[in-house]
Amino acid sequence: MEIGIDSFASAMYGDNNTLSSVDAMEQLLQRIELADQVGLDVFGIGEHHKKEFLDSATVVILSAAAARTKNIRLASAVSVLSAADPVRVYQSFATLDLISKGRAEIVVGRGSSIEAYPLFGFNLNDYDALFKEKLELFLQIRDNEFVTWSGKFRPAINNLPIYPRTVQEKLPVWLGVGGTPESFIRAGSLGLPLMVAIIGGQTHRFRPLIDLYRQAGAAAGYKPKELKVGIHSPGYVGTSTEKAIDEYYPGYAELWTKLGLERGWPPVTKAKFDGLIDDDGVLIVGSPERVAEKLSRHSESLGGVDRFTFQMDNAGLTHKQLMNAIELIGTKVIPLLKKG
């Protein structure tokens, strides 16, 4: 199982939330450097267009990280393809691939945060149609130097070349999904690796949806090894499970209660949190041993997981705490997983 971190470049943490954007960005790049040094497989940067996040220009951050790292793969988490031009998105990630010498990846999705749609002049009523059309064009660009294409939401392209091309023969494109069955089927039918955002409840409940993905992929002629499954979930690693909970819970409760006011969720309680960190709950919070054991259990319950990415930096944790967690993941959790 590959292990990584996903960040939304949160600017909300620090001493009384007074950290400057300049310092928050520098600290984020330091965390990516450390993740590379201690052997994590991938670091992903999200895409939001809100005051509390600094990830609106995802590829710029990843390119800065590429110049400061050697081995770690650099990905989006996710790119809101529906509200972007697939030509420019491909060109940006191809350029990142050149800078990183073949370490670029992209996770594309429709976006659970919808602020990009009005910002770039798109209608939310076209939420699914936009993504379907733009994904089709993006994959055509990835696979062909010269492109001929026409659609509803973008001017046609008539046998035009698109440059630069990637170092990798094919840019890895993961499909980021939530809980919509059609999205799992789409990923399988296209033979794309699947990245499932599981942020609440019990992880094993996603097994029927992942089975749909694998069935759709098999029906489309793809081999099992081509149908990779990734999981993105909130989590945190401490030197002990008690310490991890003590450090993680206050910020988690504050953030998710705030989000609940926006999205109609109930406030976070300690009892609810305790359910989320139990054996079957979604939150991967604890000591390295506890985290490795839980990741293995989740993988088994889902029929095999190829990649897991922690979402850690939006729970009020300090830079020092996040650096310590990354070091523990690289030096403790990954060796435990490899040992089996």
Image: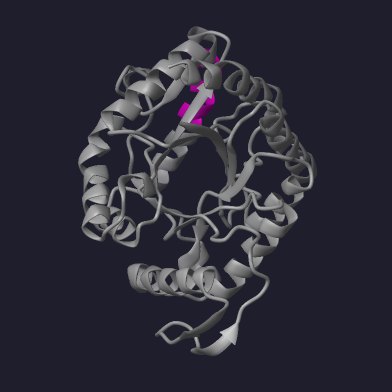
> Looking at the image, which is closer to me, 276 or 219?
219
Q: Quadrant of the N terminus?
A: top left
Verify whether residue 131 appears in magenta. Answer: no
Residue at 34 percent across and 73 percent down: it is 129
Q: Toward which corner of the image does residue 247 lie, by quadrant?
A: top right
> Looking at the image, which is closer to me, 78 or 105?
105
Left or right of 231 in this view: 311? right
Colour style of the rendered protein structure: one colour
- The reply to whether residue 181 is visible in this rendering is no
Please identify the residue farthest to the bottom as the structure is shown: 158
Coordinates of residue 30 in the picture (x, y in percent): 75, 35
Residue at 53 percent across and 27 percent down: it is 251
- State whether residue 295 is above or below residue 10: above
SS majority, magenta: helix
Residue at 40 percent across and 68 percent down: it is 131
> Looking at the image, which is closer to me, 336 or 237?
336
The magenta-colored residue range is 245-254
- The reply to whether residue 127 is visible in this rendering is yes
Coordinates of residue 29 in the picture (x, y in percent): 74, 40
- State whether residue 176 is above or below residue 231: below
The mark tally for this picture is: 0
Coordinates of residue 240 in the picture (x, y in percent): 53, 8
Q: Quadrant of the C terminus?
A: top left
Left or right of 318 in this view: 204? left
Coordinates of residue 18 in the picture (x, y in percent): 73, 35
Q: Toward which corner of the image does residue 56 lie, by quadrant?
A: bottom right
